[in-house]
Amino acid sequence: MKKVSSFKRRFICTTFLTLMSLLFSPPYLDALNAATVTYSGPVNWTVTTYDSFNPYSVHNAYNPVTITINGRSYTYYTVTSKVPTDNTVNTSQKTTLENHASSQTAEVQVIAEGTKWATELYIIRSTNPGPTVMIVGGIHGNEAAGYKAAEEIKNWKINRGTLLVLPRANKQAIAINKRYVKSEGDLNRSFPVRSSSYGSGTLARAIYKTVQDYKVDWLMDMHEGYDFYKNSSTDSVGQTLIYYPNTATKNISKKIVKTINANISSSYRQFTLLRYPVRGSLARASAEFLGVNSFIFETSQKQDLTLRIDYHKKAAEILLKELGMK
Ligand SMILES: [Zn+2]
């Protein structure tokens, strides 16, 4: 039997211990101890946090927070690419975690406040600079897919820029499930048709002023048609995207239509790209007089509501992704 030298023995022993310690030491980014926590508030959000025992995550982590999940308490550090200068633990730890981890803030502003047209505008701001996108639903009260999709979109998380969501633009019309309130006329023909105009009626003016005040870069207005555009026996614009032409809007509009159509086998039901939103519409006025990249997205009501809502959400998602916001 060959004698093992003391050097060799020490070497084997050290290697063994090193291997064991590597096996049992916390991984670099502690995926095993990561937890996804969901909160609901003005904005619903989900964040993945990493265990505080991980020395590597502590390196770029901040704000230890104790969260109770299913009766068990965990201490976590949130890990994001942005480390705020203030490392103190806030009294309201939940709020701190919410704001820091999501790197966004949310607020609600009531537009046409104090009038019967009062309606909520949700303002989601990322701490990272970027474009301002406005998504509008419920300009027409009987086009449910738009306002229902917008209600969900107001809870989305964004990576940069500002997302404005006006889910229920015309609450009075939504309440009666009509295109518009008879005495007031069609809201989507009440926006300016001349650069010097502010639009007609309290609501149109308030919405148009919002687009101006927030210096909106992109506007998506969600609508529905009663039939398919490809049904030539009707004048419906269901399943279309109608944009106000400029290069940027054209490119993103094309991308939206192409991506969504890839999952629609029937060409009759596919979306068609059209130009020039009608005069007096929010999209037309915003594009023509304020230089906003604007389009109207129209689903056909001859389909299930769930599917129609999905189309609106998908279109909004592609827009935000193309702008690096999602
Ligand atoms: Zn409409």
Image (cartoon, grey):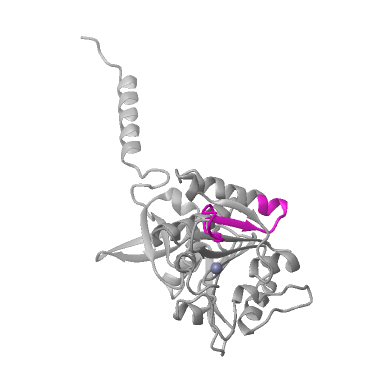
Residue located at (60% from left, 80% from top): 185
**Magenta residues, start to end:** 230-250
Please name the predominant secondary structure of the magenta segment in the image. Answer: loop
Q: Quick one: 54 or 5, which is closer to the camera? A: 54
Q: Horizontal and vertical percent for residue 80?
A: 50, 55
Task: Specify the quadrant that holds the N terminus.
Answer: top left
Of residue 185 and residue 323, the one placed in the foreground of this image is: 185
Examine the rendered structure and indicate whether residue 5 appears above or below residue 263.
above
Residue 234 lies within the magenta run: yes
Q: Is residue 187 left or right of residue 309?
A: right
Residue most extreme to the front:
233
Q: Nearer the viewer, residue 90 or 82?
A: 82
Q: Residue furthest right?
A: 196
Quadrant assignment for ligand 1: bottom right
In percent of width and height, residue 311 lies at: 47, 56
**Count of numbered circles in the view:** 0
Q: Quadrant of residue 165?
A: bottom right
Image x and y of residue 172, in percent: 50, 82
- Toward the top, the furthest residue is 1
